[in-house]
Structure formats: C-alpha cells, structure tokens
Image: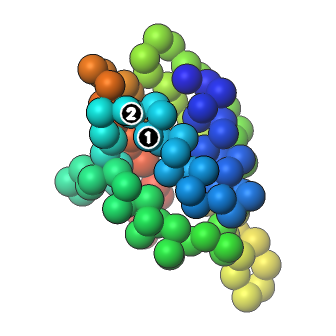
C-alpha cells in the first residue's frame, strides 16, 4: 500500500494522469471514492479528472509523512501551488482505506 500511495504523488508530479488513475485503480480494484471532508464522496475517476483539470501543472506535492497500518493509511502532504508571486504551500491530511477491494480516500484541506 505504501509504495502505491507514494507512486500517486510521484506520478502527479511527473504529470502522468493515466499513471495516477491506474495507481488509484490498483489500490481500489472494485472502485474508489474521493471525499473532500465536509462534502459528499465523489466517484473517484471523475474526481481525479476534475482535480487534474484544475491543478495539474500548477501544483506539485511533497509527501511529508506517510503512515500505513494494515489496510489504512494517512499522509501529511504539502501542496505547492504556483502563484504569480511564487509558490504557496498548503498542507493537507489525506487518508486511504481499502475494504473489500473498494478504496475510500478523504482529503482534509484548510478552508478559508
């Protein structure tokens, strides 16, 4: 699980959308959801495509800490957003849980 999760962030930084999707699908062969905490979970593939369209090329990620226990993981991520006046780093906590082949991903992002 750790290797596949780390690959998601590396593939994102390499701007390999198909690789990112494949990594999520490998973790959740029966499907996956993405939840931005505070909102309803979204179907995973479309959520990644939407995220890609909004942030690919303008945001890279650094895995600060990744903890894996059995079928669950939690990561502290630094999202590095390119802006006119430089890079702004926004932390997030991202959790992964696999149950019966279904992956549930939750993103805790700072809100205004």
Quadrant of the rendered structure where residue 59 is? bottom right
Q: Residue furthest bottom?
A: 84
Q: Residue pushed farthest right? A: 86
Residue at the image position 75 percent from the left and 72 percent from the top:
87
- How dense is the environment of label 1, judged by Cα within 10 Å: few (below 14), some, or many (20 and up)? some
Q: CA distance from mark 1 to mark 2?
A: 5 Å
| Tag 2 residue | 28
- Residue 32 can be seen, yes or no: yes
Residue 59 in the image: above or below residue 44: below
Residue positioned 56% across, 56% down in the render: 18
Q: For the point 48% across and 34% down, which residue is it?
A: 26
14 over 64 or under it: above or below: below
Considering depth in this image, is 53 or 94 the residue closer to the camera? 53
Q: Residues within 10 Å of mark 2 (few under 14, many from 20)?
A: many
Q: Tag 1, which secondary structure?
A: helix
Viewer-proximal residue among 8 and 93 = 8
From what the image shows, is residue 64 above or below residue 71?
A: below
Q: Quadrant of residue 63?
A: top right
Where, quadrant-wise, is the C terminus in this rendering? bottom left
Percent from the top left, x then y, of residue 62?
72, 48
Q: Position of residue 61 (x, y in %)?
A: 68, 54
Residue receiving disc 1: 25
Q: Is residue 98 left or right of residue 10?
A: left
Asked if the residue under mark 2 is in contact with the one under mark 1, i.e. CB atoms within 8 Å, the reply is yes
Closest to the observer: 16 or 98?
A: 16
Query: Which SS class for mark 2?
Result: loop
Q: Position of residue 40 (x, y in %)?
A: 20, 54
Which labelled disc corresponds to residue 57? none
Say which quarter of the image contains residue 101. top left
Tell me the residue at 66%/39% (across/down): 7
Q: Position of residue 75 (x, y in %)?
A: 57, 35
């Amino acid at each position: 699980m750790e290797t596949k999760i780390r690959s998601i962030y590396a593939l994102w930084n390499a701007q390999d959308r198909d690789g990112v999707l494949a990594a999520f699908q490998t973790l959740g062969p029966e499907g996956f959801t993405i939840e931005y905490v505070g909102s309803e979970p979204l179907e995973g593939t479309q959520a990644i495509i939407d995220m890609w369209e909004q942030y690919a090329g303008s945001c890279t990620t650094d895995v600060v800490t990744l903890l894996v226990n059995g079928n669950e993981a939690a990561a502290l991520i630094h999202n590095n957003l390119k802006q006119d006046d430089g890079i702004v780093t926004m932390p997030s906590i991202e959790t992964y849980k696999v149950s019966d082949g279904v992956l549930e991903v939750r993103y805790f992002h700072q809100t205004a």
